[in-house]
Image (cartoon, helix red, strand yellow):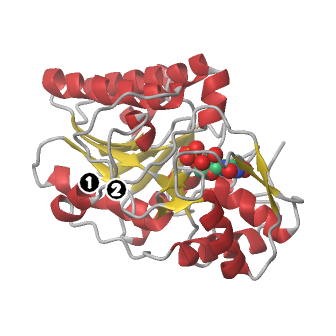
């Protein structure tokens, strides 16, 4: 039996595929390459190019392969873009989930692990955020993911499709040898942008707001290494295969870093100056997002290896230095 990784050519998906292949799992990847990269997909995986909203495409994949578990990364994830193009997010993320679940139901596939997000909490009622805290998103990205969580609950009740929803906080870093990493076009995420400045590909970093309700006024986020994140998915697959009930887990380091602290850590990790200026706030950003990740640690036995944000940045720096143009496949 194989594991189907949808969105396996993306940043997190490609790390998951490599991790699974290293464990000798049979991996099938489906990706429409809208934001992913063919070169990011490990050669040990079988690749299908297509879109999860395309029923004929998904049917073909499920008919041809013996899939027992789906890991779903095929979603858009840029908060500011979602504020401008909400329907794009409800279409790909929410409707894409419905199409995927319909095909899983029709092909009797009963397990799915999927990416949810800290953005489903909106402005948190307390910190660190626990899984049972109120979910009230303040951007369409978070809303589209909350809808995915709700939909899957009903699909579980009706069709017995068991799920683990993993609410990611901020994912960063790259495969430690620098062979795969983060490459979005255009790039909007903090760590890769900081490193592009370090490399001299950008003149300076714009820090989006220094008047937030945080110790230094800049947004505080909880950064997790992408390989640790992939490992949590592997544990989640095992959790469902062991017959456990569907559940949700936060994935974070439980430590918050402000934008200014991230810049400082990157200066130390790279030895570069990294000029930064204060710019206006970006729409949709809550003050602070820090995970309580005790549940993943105790229930899934998740034991993240990276606990120093500087080490996380160093892995991303290796990727950035060896791949100054990312996968270099922009059309
Ligand atoms: N950020 C910033 N400058 C940038 C990119 C991001 O100040 O060029 C800030 C952003 O406002 C947020 C944090 O960095 O507070 C993390 O943003 P990112 O887009 O990486 O992840 P998000 O939290 O939106 O998922």
Whether residue 268 is visible to the viewer of this picture, yes or no, is yes
Residue at x 48% of width, y 77% of height: 308
User: Residue 36: in sight, yes or no?
Assistant: no
Query: Which image quarter is the C terminus in?
Result: top right
Determine whether 85 is above or below 278 in the image: above
Work out how far the residue at label 2 is from the one at label 1, CA to CA, in angstroms. Answer: 6 Å
* Residue sitting at x 65%, y 33%: 80
Classify mark 1: residues with Cα within 10 Å, few (<14), some (14-19) or many (20+): many
**Mark 2 closeness class: few <14, some 14–19, many ≥20 residues within 10 Å:** many
Left-right relation of 51 to 252: right
* 177 versus 61 height, above or below: below
Res 282 → quadrant = top right
Q: Secondary structure at mark 1?
A: helix
Q: Residue furthest top?
A: 87
Which residue is more in the foreground, 243 or 208? Answer: 208
Q: Tell me residue 263's x, y (percent).
A: 68, 66
Which residue is denoted by mark 1 in the rendering?
237
């Amino acid at each position: 039996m194989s594991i189907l990784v949808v969105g396996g050519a993306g940043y997190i998906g490609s790390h998951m595929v490599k991790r699974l292949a290293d464990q000798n799992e049979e991996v099938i990847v489906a990706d429409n390459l809208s934001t992913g990269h063919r070169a990011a997909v490990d050669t040990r995986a079988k690749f299908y190019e297509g879109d999860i909203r395309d029923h004929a495409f998904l049917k073909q994949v499920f008919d041809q392969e013996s899939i027992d578990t789906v890991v779903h990364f095929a979603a858009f994830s840029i908060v500011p873009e979602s504020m401008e193009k909400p329907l794009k997010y409800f279409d790909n993320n929410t409707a894409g989930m419905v199409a995927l679940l319909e095909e899983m139901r029709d092909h009797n596939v009963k397990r799915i692990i999927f990416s949810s997000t800290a953005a489903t909490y909106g402005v948190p009622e307390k910190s660190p955020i626990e899984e049972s805290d109120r979910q009230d998103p303040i951007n369409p990205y978070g809303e589209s993911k909350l809808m995915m969580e709700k939909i899957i609950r009903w699909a579980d009740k009706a069709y017995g499709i068991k799920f683990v929803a993993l609410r990611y906080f901020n994912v960063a870093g790259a495969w430690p040898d620098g062979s795969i990493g983060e490459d979005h076009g255009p790039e909007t995420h903090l760590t890769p942008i900081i490193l592009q400045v370090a490399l001299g590909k950008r003149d300076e970093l714009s820090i989006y707001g220094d008047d937030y309700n945080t110790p230094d006024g800049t947004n505080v986020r909880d950064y997790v290494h992408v390989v640790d994140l992939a490992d949590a998915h592997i544990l989640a697959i095992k959790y469902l295969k062991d017959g456990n009930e569907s559940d949700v887990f936060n994935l974070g380091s439980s430590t918050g870093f402000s934008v200014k602290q991230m810049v400082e850590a990157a200066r130390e990790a790279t030895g570069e100056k990294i000029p930064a200026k204060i710019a206006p706030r970006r729409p949709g950003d809550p003050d602070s997002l820090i995970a309580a990740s005790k549940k993943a640690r105790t229930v899934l036995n998740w034991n993240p290896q990276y606990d120093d944000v500087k080490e996380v940045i160093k892995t991303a720096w290796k990727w950035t230095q060896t791949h100054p143009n990312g996968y270099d496949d922009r059309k």
